[in-house]
Every structure is written in structure tokens, then in C-alpha cells.
Amino acid sequence: MGTKVLITKERLAKLYAAMERNKLKPGPLMPTLQEAQSIFGCVPIEIQKIIGKELHESVAKINGVVTFYSMFSIEPKGENIISVCLGTACYVRGSQGVLDAFADDLKLKAGETSADGKFTLQATRCIGACGLAPTFTVNETVYGNTTVQKAREVLAGIR
């Protein structure tokens, strides 16, 4: 953790443009938060305050939304997001060992991002691919019927 969010004039201009567009729609908060996540790589409290002021929403409400939905993050995530499913089907078929292998190789705990910003490791609950258990994802790609060896091979391919 500890990666600093880069808030530049250009990024702020994109955010303000997004808020102006979204204000014209019913329910502007979610699309604005999605665009903020895309622009900044996360939605830190500084950005939540700006959104709250512009959309006339409380920061408490915005923070509740950001911390509830897994698509949003308060901290920047890495270029490669590895999520290991720990849902029941995956867990009983060995996903904890897969998570531990990633943690050992990346020197990260679940929920952490590498200092170089290359990797974020996450433990998730059911991704809806129980028939392929155990599963993990790297960015948008789902890997099924995985093993510790498969996890290490995928990681080596990314590096």
C-alpha cells in the first residue's frame, strides 16, 4: 500500500466534465464514481469531497457507496489485479493454497498493492464460476481448475 494518487489539473478537468454530463441524468452518483475510478484508478477521500460538493451529496453517502461496491477502491490498485476466489466451492478445492502462492511470490497480503504499482492481490467471494473451482482472475481473465503450479505459471507470464 501507500501508493499516492496523482491528482492533476488534467484529471480534475476530466472529472468535472464527467460530473457536468452526469448531472443531466437521473442518478448521477454511480456513473460519476465509475468515471472517477477510471480517471484516478481509485476514488480517494479528496475526490469524494469534490464529487459531494458538485453533486450535492454527503461525503458519508459517497464513502458508503465507494466502500460497499468492490468495483471501487479508496487506494490505487496495481496494473494487474489478481483476485483469488475463496467462495465455498473454490475454498474446498484448494483456493487458499493458490492465494498463499500468489502472496508468497508477490510478497503481498490479500488487499495489498506492490510498491511498484504492478500488482494488487485480492481475496474475493464467489465469482460465479463454481463449476471451474478453484478459480482466480487476472484483470478480466478467469482461470479455472487452477493449482498452485498454474498460479505460478500465470504470474511468470505477466512478469
Image: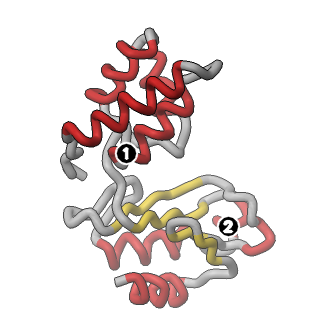
The image shows a total of numbered marks equal to: 2
Residue 107 coordinates in the image, percent (x, y): 28, 70
Residue 75 coordinates in the image, percent (x, y): 32, 44
Q: Please tell me the numbered disc located at residue 39.
A: 1
Amino acid type indicated by mark 2? Cys
Residue in the picture at 68% in, 56% down: 126
Residue in the picture at 32% in, 21% down: 50
Task: Of the two numbered discs 1 and 2 on the same chain, state the one appearing first in sequence.
Answer: 1
Badge 1 marks a residue whose secondary structure is: helix
Residue in the picture at 69% in, 81% down: 145
Q: Please tell me the numbered disc located at residue 55.
A: none
Residue 127 coordinates in the image, percent (x, y): 67, 58
Q: Which residue is mark 2?
A: 90
Side of 69 relative to 79 (left or right): right
Amino acid type indicated by mark 1? Ile
Image height of 35 relative to 96, above or below: above
Image height of 62 relative to 158, above or below: above
Image height of 114 relative to 7, above or below: below
Q: Quadrant of the C terminus?
A: bottom left
Q: Nearest to the eye among marks 1 and 2: give it.
A: 1
Residue in the picture at 45% in, 15% down: 55
